Amino acid sequence: MKNQWLEFFYGSVTVRVEGKGIERFLNVLIRNGLHVWNVKRHGSGTATFTMRLQDALQIRRYARHSDCSIGFLRRNGAPFLVKRIFKNSGFFLGAVAFFLIIIILSNSIWGIEIKGAKPATEYKIRKELDQMGIKVGKFQFSIDSVESIQRKLTNNIGAITWVGVELKGTTYHFQVVEKKQPKDPKVLAPQNLIAKKKAIIVKRFVERGKPVVDINDHVEAGQLLVSGLIGKEDGPMQAVAAKGEILGETWYKSYVELPLQTRFKVYNGKEQQKHSLLIGKFEVPIWGFQKVKFKEYETEKNEHAIHFFKWSLPISYVNRTFREKEDIIRTYSNEEGIKVAMEIAKKDIKKRLDEDATIKDAKILHEAFQNGKVTLSIHFQIYENIAKGQPITQGDLMND
């Protein structure tokens, strides 16, 4: 059975032969290595058959020594197709150019829609998008991934809590959730202010209520600081919501252990890129054919689907970035280790405190150097608001 793809590649022609001794003529062709198939009789003196283009170039010299005349009916295969394409090259190039223009336009940005944001916030988002290169007319392949855009917008714009990013066709859609403005302070029920923890009072600011402690007083957890019962001693008492700040000196201990020598990997700035087309499950390299020359590296892969109008084609553009990594050994001296460990301890303490608390002093109680590590025991002196509300009960009113 003939390989049709092979015959298409070489090209074939359909030949008509007329005259006497057609069978002898065909036998001569076959004996001389010419391939002939699809032989058909059309009456007593006419037949047709198919043969390769390269063999058809030799057939006339065999026809001269026979009583037959030949003619060519049809031409098929790649050589004739290429010839027709070149003959109609203007139309072919126009069709290719049209297809490429549609592909380029379908994979560009032609719209940016932002929903859920106030005008001021929308202006900030569009300004940030311009800095990121997300503009109308930009090629989508040069834009960061949707996840990266979402992360950068959330980190760089403080007015938003969350932003959803979605690419539909040639339009980016942004759904924004803004941070809620602080609510009006709610009306508090009558209350006292008591100490949250043991402390020494260093400062007080009372907006409402009667202070019952002074500066430098030592208080225990649960002790009354500001009374919500106000009035004259010989008259009825009025219950109000005590309000204010009582700044107290509190104490914390922290233990930190830090290796003096640490090995870790960092990027050194060298990178290599490869570009390819993913057609179905097959990946075809189009740029960057060299092997990755780095011993240790990390690979970042970005894949962008290619669109034709609103439809996604089974073709994707793939960009891989290979970033070289190298080992770094960081070594601290004893003094540097103590300083770094102290900073780590301060960051850890701040996580456990309110935002308005401050570190007044820090003293190292104990330090040790063992097994390549520095171990510190640190005492922190903190100034923080120690007041918290406690509702006034009916019993409190009766007692007073």
Image: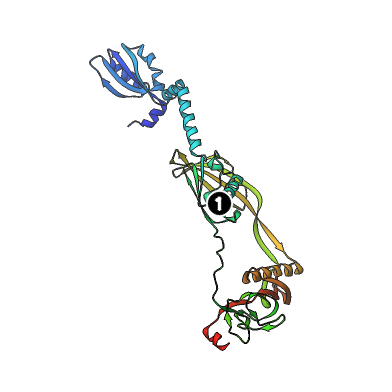
Out of 245 and 61, give the one closest to the viewer.
Answer: 245
Q: How many marks?
A: 1
Q: Name the residue under label 1.
A: 148
User: Residue 88's x, y, as percent?
Assistant: 45, 21
Q: In which quarter of the image is the N terminus?
A: top left
Out of 107 and 199, give the one closest to the viewer.
Answer: 199
Side of 374 where 145 appears, left or right: left
Q: Can residue 272 be seen in this view?
A: yes
Out of 385 and 242, give the one closest to the viewer.
Answer: 242
User: Residue 334's x, y, as percent?
Assistant: 75, 69
Residue shown at 66%/50% (left/top)? Answer: 269
Side of 92 where 350 appears, left or right: right
Question: Does dot 1 land on a helix, a strand or a loop?
Answer: helix
Q: Is residue 360 above or below residue 87?
A: below
Q: Is residue 34 visible?
A: no
The amino acid pointed to by label 1 is: Ser
Residue neighbourhood size for the residue with mark 1, other residues' Cα within 10 Å, grouped as few (<14), some (14–19), many (≥20): few
User: Residue 329's x, y, as percent?
Assistant: 69, 61
